[in-house]
Image: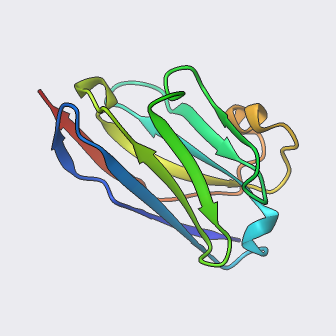
Amino acid sequence: QVQLVESGGASVQTGASLRLSCVASGGRTFRNYVMGWFRQAPGKEREFLAAINWGGGSTYYVDSARGRFTIWRDNDRNTVYLQLSTLTPEDTAVYYCAADPRSRNLMGVGEMRYIEAWGQGTLVTVSS
C-alpha cells in the first residue's frame, strides 16, 4: 500500500499563499494513481478540493478551489502539490492528499470510494 506524507502547512495571514506537498512511497508506481487533495475544518466533514490524473495533463477543481488553488504533480519525484492562494480564515483546515488507483473520472475522486491511502494531514491556519 502506498504511504503519503504531506508538508507545507503553516500559520499565515489573510491573503497569503502556501504550497503544500505530498510525497508518496511504496505501493504501485506513483503514476498509476490519480491523486486528490481534501481538507477538513474543525467540526466539519472532509471536503474534496481537487484531483489530477496520472500524467498530470488533466485536473479537476471544486468550485471553492477553482481559481485560487492549483494542483500539479511531478511523477519523477513521486510528489503531488497544491498551491493555495489568496487565503482567508475560511481556508483554515487540515489538508490531506489521497491516492486513488481506480477512478476514471476525476470528479469521482471526491466520492472517496476508491481511496487507497490518506496522508496524515498538514495544518493550515489563516488569521485575519
Instruction: Choose between 5 and 71: the one closer to the eye.
Output: 71
The furthest residue to the left: 128
The furthest residue to the top: 63
Viewed as shown, does residue 17 lie left or right of 36?
Answer: left
Image position, residue 6 (x, y; %): 44, 62
Image position, residue 50 (x, y; %): 60, 38
Instruction: Choose between 23 and 40: the one closer to the eye.
Output: 23
Figure check: 28 above or below 119: below
Instruction: Choose between 19 and 40: the one closer to the eye.
Output: 19
Residue at the location (59% across, 77% down)? Answer: 77
Name the colouring of the figure.
rainbow
Residue 15 placement: quadrant? top left
Residue 63 placement: quadrant? top right
Q: Quadrant of the C terminus?
A: top left
Viewed as shown, does residue 15 lie left or right of 51?
Answer: left
Image position, residue 112 (x, y; %): 70, 39
Residue at the location (48% across, 27% down)? Answer: 45
Label tally: 0
Image position, residue 70 (x, y; %): 52, 43
Residue at the location (33% across, 37% down)? Answer: 93
Figure check: 86 above or below 38: above
Q: Quadrant of the N terminus?
A: bottom right
